[in-house]
Amino acid sequence: MVNEKPEWESVVRELRRLYPNARCELNFVSPFQLLIATVLSAQCTDVRVNEVTARLFAKYPTVHEMLSLEQAALAEEIRSLGLFRHKARNILALCRVLCERFACDVPRTIEELTELPGVGRKTASVVVNNAFGVPALAVDTHVFRVAKRLGWADGKTPFAVEQELRALLPDAMWGEVHHLLIWHGRRLCYARCPLCVACPLRELVACRVVGGRQL
């Protein structure tokens, strides 16, 4: 059961102190590039995605240039990433839908974005928040894990956890908290062997981790 009164305000203050530069770590200069980078980030690190997109976007920075590629050629461009054939197929398919239905522009709502091939709710939330400043709370593996350990959520699915976090936090903070939880999950609150001894949040909440295992 979720803690009845999570001390989320003090936790957020501490996370802000720990990670004053918390932000999206994918490199992009347009909503389209963020959309593509986020699709590519599935089962890959942001560091690796940035290495690939630096080359990819230098040659194919917009939807029009991307559509000039054959699927095999795009797959070769992103070959070093996991699921590269599947991602190449989805990227070209979503590019076609963008031009057929949205005048080659990236839509600004989660509902429209999730109509694109290969775009789920998490990807859509990342795009609308970071590209357009729309309040959204993407729940990836780090947000899912850290939110549950903090007692902020106990849902069994990312969507359930998202709904709990949206109910807990002011909408103006959704994007910021998303980044703070990701940074904490990547730097201290690991899935395996979290660094609880070094975590300043241990003084603020009864974290749901005992002996390196999540309760």
Image (cartoon, grey):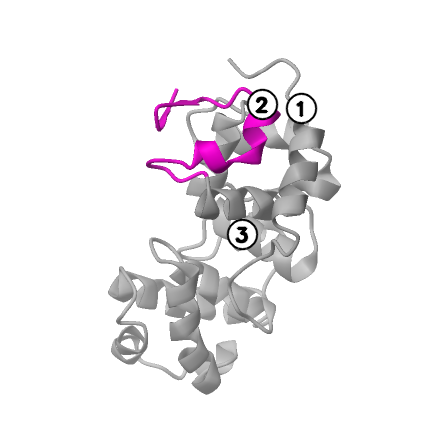
Residue 203, x across and y down, in percent: 59, 25
Q: Residue 98: which disc?
A: none
The residue where tag 2 is placed is: 205
Viewer-closest of 142 and 119: 142
Place of residue 21 in the rendered image (x, y in percent of width and height, measured from the top left): 63, 56
Determine the CA span between mark 3 and mark 1. 29 Å
Whether tag 1 and tag 2 are in contact, CB under 8 A, the answer is yes
**Segment colored magenta:** 189-215
Q: Is residue 136 left or right of residue 212?
A: right
Question: Which numbered disc flags the more N-terminal residue, 3 or 1?
Answer: 1
Look at label 2 and name its amino acid: Val
Amino acid on which the number 3 mark rests in the picture: Ala
What residue is at 41 percent from the left and 81 percent from the top? 55
Sequence order check, earlier mark of 1 and 2 = 1
Q: Sequence-wise, which precedes: disc 3 or disc 2?
A: 3
Q: Quadrant of residue 68?
A: bottom left
Q: Residue at x 38, y 74 (%)?
A: 52
In this orientation, which residue lies closer to the viewer: 159 or 190? 190
Residue furthest bottom as drawn = 59
| Foreground label between 3 and 2 | 2
Quick check: 69 above or below 116? below
Label 3: which residue?
124
Q: CA distance from mark 3 to mark 2?
A: 31 Å
Q: Quadrant of residue 113?
A: bottom right
Q: Is the residue under label 1 in contact with that under label 3 (CB below 8 Å)?
A: no
